[in-house]
Amino acid sequence: MLRYLTRRLLLMIPVLLGITFIVFALLAFAPGSFVSLMLSSGVVNPDAVARIRAELGLNDPWTVRYLHYLGALAHGNLGRSIVFDQPVAQQLVQALPNTLVLTVAATAFALAVSMVAGTVSAVRRNTLLDYAAMLVAVGGVSIPSFWLGLMLLLVFGLGLHWLPIGGGGVTGGVSGGWAFVSHLILPAVTLGAELAALLTRLVRNTLLDVLTEDYIRTARAKGLAGYRVVSRHALKNALLPVITTVGVQFGALLGGAVIIETIYSWPGMGLLTVTAIQQRDLPVVQGAVLVFAMCFVLVVLLTDLMYVAVDPRIHYE
């Protein structure tokens, strides 16, 4: 196990280097920059722009700037925000906990809904409960998350006034139990709705296959209650594809967080990235993408390790 873990961690290095290269190259050739934005808004004159470009090293070839960026990364330096004049690492440290809390809450919501709905749908196959669960699941996959977010905000925030319409977060100045949770509910439900629908169908289909296995028939022949057969035997063996899907879909949740955080003004990595793109703050964009990539790679590794805990037959030599 230790050798496998070490090998996977070492393989992360070229993956992350490739991501930094692609992102840096795309941003280098993207039109517009912070100084051109300043010039178009009339903040500074052309002479000042030329001086700023020289100070920031923007006159150097992008390959030279990339090598300088890698040298800074080797020393743990993600650069400095051009707009806010703060270290990028400091901004990411403030925003990352909010995104992680939102993503974990969305995943927990998706798992809770899908395990219950998928199990009931499989056990009560071809009944009204099964048809209702599948109808909701198809709707959850089909509805765009940004539209669902706006509708939930309109109904529960602006219409019924049950929940706040924005703000919150671990570092968002909201403290207290219900105050924090109330700001988290709508973004988490919106972000986790599509994953919940996907997992519901997966749990149902996987559980239907498991319920036809011989050991399930044997357990029932021994007189075990139906709920014990499902919970202790069938459901555990149906978890492997669920774990795989959750691990793969974590990247989709991070990508969706960019939209959801913007809709609900949730002060996380997504909102920070969108703001940095709008203001051409390239060091922040590069740092945010790198952190997103690291989170995704680590979650995929954690997913592989969880296989061993769920299925003792799996070994990593």
Image (spheres, rainbow, N blue to C red):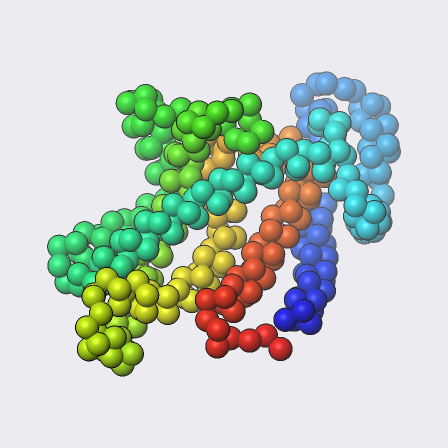
Q: Position of residue 170 (x, y in %)?
A: 55, 31
Q: In the current view of this chain or complex, which residue is farthest to the front?
A: 223
- Which residue is at 25% across, 75% downward? 219
Q: Using the image, determine if residue 217 lies above or below residue 139.
A: below
Q: Quadrant of residue 298?
A: bottom right
Residue 311 visible at all: yes
Q: Using the image, determine if residue 79 lies above or below residue 117.
A: above
- In the image, taking residue 72 as reference, residue 145 lies left or right, namely left
Q: Position of residue 118 (x, y in %)?
A: 28, 58
Q: Using the image, determine if residue 41 lies above or below residue 280.
A: above
Q: In the current view of this chain or complex, which residue is farthest to the bottom?
A: 214
- Which residue is at 32% across, 69% downward? 233
Task: Name the quadrant of the N terminus.
Answer: bottom right
Q: Quadrant of residue 188?
A: top left
**Residue toward you, 231 or 287:** 231
Q: Position of residue 160 (x, y in %)?
A: 28, 23
Residue 62 visible at all: no
- In the image, taking residue 77 as reference, residue 29 lies left or right, namely left
Task: Name the quadrant of the C terminus.
Answer: bottom right
Q: Position of residue 93 (x, y in %)?
A: 66, 37
Q: Quadrant of residue 39?
A: top right
Q: Tag count in the figure?
A: 0
- Which residue is at 83% across, 47% downward? 75
**Residue toward you, 301 or 153:** 301
- In the image, taking residue 99 as reference, residue 191 lies left or right, namely left
**Residue toward you, 77 or 307:** 307
- Which residue is at 24% across, 79% downward? 218
